[in-house]
Image: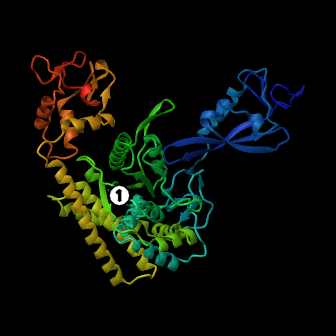
Amino acid sequence: MNQTMQPRHPEWVFFNESGVPVSTFIPSAVGVVRVVGSTDEREAVRVRLRFKNGSDTETTVPLSDLNRVDWFKIDHRCLTNSEYRRARGYIADTIRAGVSNVPVERRYVLDRTGIYHIGDSIIFVAGNRVITQSSAPRTDPDFELGQLPLRLDIDENIDISTAIDRMMRLISLSPEIGPVLAAHTISGIIRAAFKEAGMTPCAVLVIVGKSGMLKSHYVPHLVQLYNRADGIGPVTRFNSTKRFIEDTLYEHSECTAVLDDLHTAESRGIKRQNEDTAEEIIRRIADDTGRGRMDGKAQVQRSFRGNAVFIGEYTIGKASTIPRALVVNITEPPNGAVLDEYQRNRPLLVSTFYYYFIRWYVDHFNEIRDSIDAKLTQLRRATASPTTHGRLRDTQFYLEISYMVLLEFCKESRFCSEEDAKDTYQSFSTQLRTLVQAQETRFKESIEVKTIDYLDLIRDLYKQGAFHLAKDAENFKPEKHDGLIYYDCLCLRGKRLEKKLLSFTPSLSFVDCISYLLSKGALKLVESKNTVQINGTGGKRFYAIKLSKLR
């Protein structure tokens, strides 16, 4: 039975003001449900449908869909008068009229992994598992788990003591990169605590070593949190599209993703393309800004919510990206036989360890956040005149704190003593300071060359979409745009260009930049002036950089 095959005499029970029959059921709103996701909030209405015999049924309908509901699909007793064109609209209006008089409830849809605050409760969504505080009351939850592509696979035969013991052995298989990888992975898991304390871990860890160092086996084995039963390996490679890489990183919320295959065996063109991809991803992660895209009619821009590890055979980084990454070299491979034993016989050991850690983290979330807050305040006071680049200083801070949290978990689980934890932490802190100092040296060497290639820097920024450009002169707004494309030139306002350059390092000179562009014939000159005036912009002047020099 459907709307075109109504019985000869339907039992109408709902009529409009003029007595025209509307439907075989009486609709009424009984509640409003606010469905809260990680990026948006939607409203739905709970509707009671009452029939002539006194029975009723309830359903929940998005408020935005009220005019389009097929009531017959909800209950085959629900018929609307096909001869009354406004039947569905009248039903929708009736329900809307009652919305203001019904109770409102909030329903959370857990559509990403990581920490959620729901009322006074703290929970962690670990793929297919919802980990709550051990002290949380056992009541019906006011949330539902979304369809996530990630699972936390664990081995229930591994107890917490065994998990910690084997994990620490796995970390020690590579003293060069194991501790730093563990700290970086932990920082991804406890990212919400850092963020609430006032800082977001956003550096990329770059593991560098020649072929044969077992990087592609060891790194994912130590880092991968989800879907380990399906196999262990990097989530993607640098020869993937930038959009696919960003989508993959976005999916890995409050955990760590591994990107592999930055090596020297490719052709020069592919090698340069992979390097450009790596540089752009480093910058986007560090700035917590994803690529803008259209979602329906709206322009949306995603933010990254997790960590990343790059694996390569050589060091990358320009002046603008070196402080946004930390390079860790591996010169001795881990014991391949032991690693193989872990991979074949205990593939779920690491995810089981992280499961125990997350349970402890959720129980101690407030303490961890407050401790980070206090230590962050001390850091800011102690480094009023820092000698290390601010981003590298922050990287050192969050890695030290994360390793400290890891050791606190081991200590409270009675795996190690207070003294052992202190000794292990001091050793890690010394190793980390050496790594940060080496990265600081790379950064200084990159900016202390005799001539900075300002044209190459601007070319990279332009290709990566770092400049906010107006569509044309009429749409140019000085408070919003850096410039525009005009007559085959990238036309930039001087102050906006200077600000963009200084955001990478205060040592860059805007005067030197203009001189360099002039020496390369990159600026379009009008009447011997370095800037051009563009009609339609209110008399504003721009530095016009030839697009032919930016290709």
The N terminus lies in quadrant: top right
Q: Secondary structure at mark 1?
A: strand
Q: In the shown orientation, is residue 354 left or right of residue 328?
A: right
On the question of residue 450 being in view, the answer is: yes
Number of other residues with Cα within 10 Å of mark 1, as a class: few under 14, some 14 to 19, many 20 or more? many
The C terminus lies in quadrant: top left
Q: Position of residue 64 (x, y in %)?
A: 60, 34
At 46% from the left and 73% from the top, the residue drawn is: 167
At 23% from the left and 65% from the top, the residue drawn is: 378
**Foreground pick, 93 / 444:** 444
**Foreground pick, 382 / 391:** 391
At 28% from the left and 19% from the top, the residue drawn is: 473
Q: In the shown orientation, is residue 311 left or right of residue 473?
A: right
Q: Position of residue 113 (x, y in %)?
A: 51, 55
Q: Position of residue 427 (x, y in %)?
A: 29, 75
**Whether residue 347 is situated above or below residue 28 in the rendered picture:** below
Q: Position of residue 451 (x, y in %)?
A: 13, 42
